[in-house]
Image (cartoon, rainbow, N blue to C red):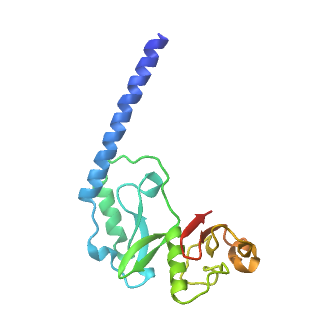
Amino acid sequence: MKKTYAVFSVVFVLLISGCVQQAGETMNETENQSLQFDDVWKSCQTDSDCMETQAGCCSCRNGGTQTAINKVYLNLWEEQISEKCQGIFCITMYACQEGKAVCDAGQCRFLAVQEACVELCEAAKAEGMVLSDGPCLSDNNPEWGIENWVCDVAHSPRQSVDNQPENQCQEFRSGKASHFVEVDTDCGFIRAV
């Protein structure tokens, strides 16, 4: 009896695995074919025009990805998701990234925290900021705007100058932020913690 139950269990798991894979393939095809933004839905003039939302049928809490859209069209996008995603099963997998919605060259886009720090570093470097001392780039910087995170320049490998308090983000040291992104002096991503 135990052997029969074990064989039945294995067959059942294999059947379910095949169904999940097929459902995933159908979900991707459905998302690609029926869910689309009108170009105007992503148009913007300032960051405040943009809102973060899910990019398809599945939210980032269920294996999907994040995007940004002009907030004027957010309700229309959510209605389209409700209509066209009925019967779509999403996997239970947390895939959300910290970040923000930005207006970039007239188009809303979602900018993950790592990308935001790299871009902030590149802008500081282009403006002639000296990065060799490992400065904090996010303190008192309105361009940052990601709560509970800071953006800091460090060396890779780490040097003693990186541990000096004046070269670390005040918001992190004071406890106002509990996460940090480090980029190197060439604006390459090091780590996010």
Q: Please tell me in which quadrant of the rendered image residue 55 appears.
A: bottom left
Reply above or below: 13 against 52. Answer: above
**At 36% from the left edge and 46% from the top edge, which residue is drawn?**
89
Reply above or below: 60 against 123. Answer: above
Q: Please tell me in which quadrant of the rendered image residue 150 appears.
A: bottom right
**At 45% from the left edge and 57% from the top edge, which residue is drawn?**
60
Image spot of residue 109 (x, y percent): 40, 72
Image spot of residue 176 (x, y percent): 69, 73
Reply above or below: 49 against 114. Answer: below
Q: Please tell me in which quadrant of the rendered image residue 175 appears.
A: bottom right
Image spot of residue 183 (x, y percent): 58, 72
Q: Quadrant of the C terminus?
A: bottom right
Most foreground residue, 145 or 126: 126
| Residue 174 seen from this side | no
Q: How many marks can you see?
A: 0
Most foreground residue, 9 or 112: 112
**At 27% from the left edge and 52% from the top edge, which residue is drawn?**
30
| Residue 69 seen from this side | yes
* Residue placed furthest toward the top: 1
Image spot of residue 90 (x, y percent): 39, 48
Most foreground residue, 157 or 52: 157
Q: Is 114 placed left or right of 67 in the picture?
A: right
* Residue placed furthest toward the bottom: 127
**At 66% from the left edge and 71% from the top edge, which residue is drawn?**
177
Most foreground residue, 86 or 148: 148
